[in-house]
Amino acid sequence: MAGRYEISDNGWALIEDIVSPPKTRGRPRRDDRQVLNGIFWILCSGAKWRDLPERYGPWSTVYDRFRQWRDDGTFGAVQTGLQLQLREDGLMDLDTWMIDSTAVRATRAASGGGKKGGPDEPVDHALGRSRGGLTTKLHLVCDRHGWPLTFTLSPGQDADTRHFMPTMETIRLPGKAGRPRKRCRYIVADKGYDSDDLRRYCDRYRMKPIIAQRKMYRKPRPGLPRGFDKPKYRERNVVERAFSWLKALRRIATRYDKLARSFRAMVCLACISRCLRADFSYRT
């Protein structure tokens, strides 16, 4: 039986082929499941890498494996595989999606990253100044059941509307056949996403935006007025509850990582942990 913060036997069976490839000759490799459990312990507890319990192995080995899986795309591949399983089992809603953002407070230790962090590392390391001080903003898209679909990071002072389209463009939901799913029928968001450009973007891809309008002057436009589906808008609390679950993990509630790609890997691990809680139809 798996302990606290650790992956269950059923969960490991779903991701073992991705995380633990066939062994090759050479020096024996420390067990991948043991190392991954150590990474999840860091994610949930928020402790420093040096404080990792000895049962997971040397902290330096676990940290090096985390960096390896972060850079070679292993975490993203695991999340994609779980999303495919959610689609096959009929647990994912492909019609109604929600988008929102939340600010993550960064500690003083998270600042001071070097200027060169890799080709996929932003210059500002997704850190900015807002009312809460040094913060990173997490933009999340989830379905009507709260399963995370994609996310992006930005400095804390950036507006939500600025990152709506870049976040939506990163959605790639795999299926058994055909192209990956990129769009939905309804996209639900709060009034922070009220923008004419954003609504035109939704119209171009035949998505119906269910977004509350801000109280401001608007130029009259020809044609029929847009309808507003209040019952569906009330379902927006799903994305708020998704944030509450993710922020229950201390490495997500507070940012300790200097590099944006390291913090992105932690958020990806949190999404993986959320998907592993699904009631999959296990087959023997």
Image: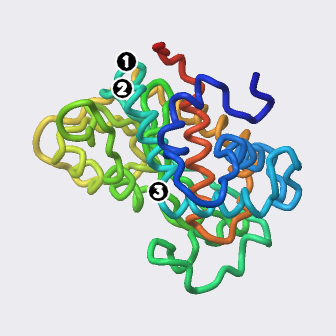
Q: Given the image, on which type of amino acid does mark 3 rest?
A: Gly
* Rendered location of residue 181, percent (x, y): 26, 38
Q: Is residue 230 visible?
A: no
- The residue at which mark 2 appears reads as 87
* Rendered location of residue 110, percent (x, y): 73, 70
Check if mark 1's residue and mark 2's residue have beta carbons within 8 Å.
Answer: yes
**Which residue is more in the foreground, 81 or 227?**
81
- The residue at which mark 1 appears reads as 90
Q: Is residue 210 left or right of residue 281?
A: left
Name the residue located 88 percent from the left edge and 48 percent from the top edge.
53
Circle 3 crowding by C-alpha within 10 Å: few under 14, some 14–19, many from 20? few
- The residue at which mark 3 appears reads as 73
Secondary structure of the residue carrying tag 2 is helix
Q: Nearer the viewer, mark 3 or mark 1?
A: 3
Q: Given the image, on which type of amino acid does mark 1 rest?
A: Gly
Circle 2 crowding by C-alpha within 10 Å: few under 14, some 14–19, many from 20? some
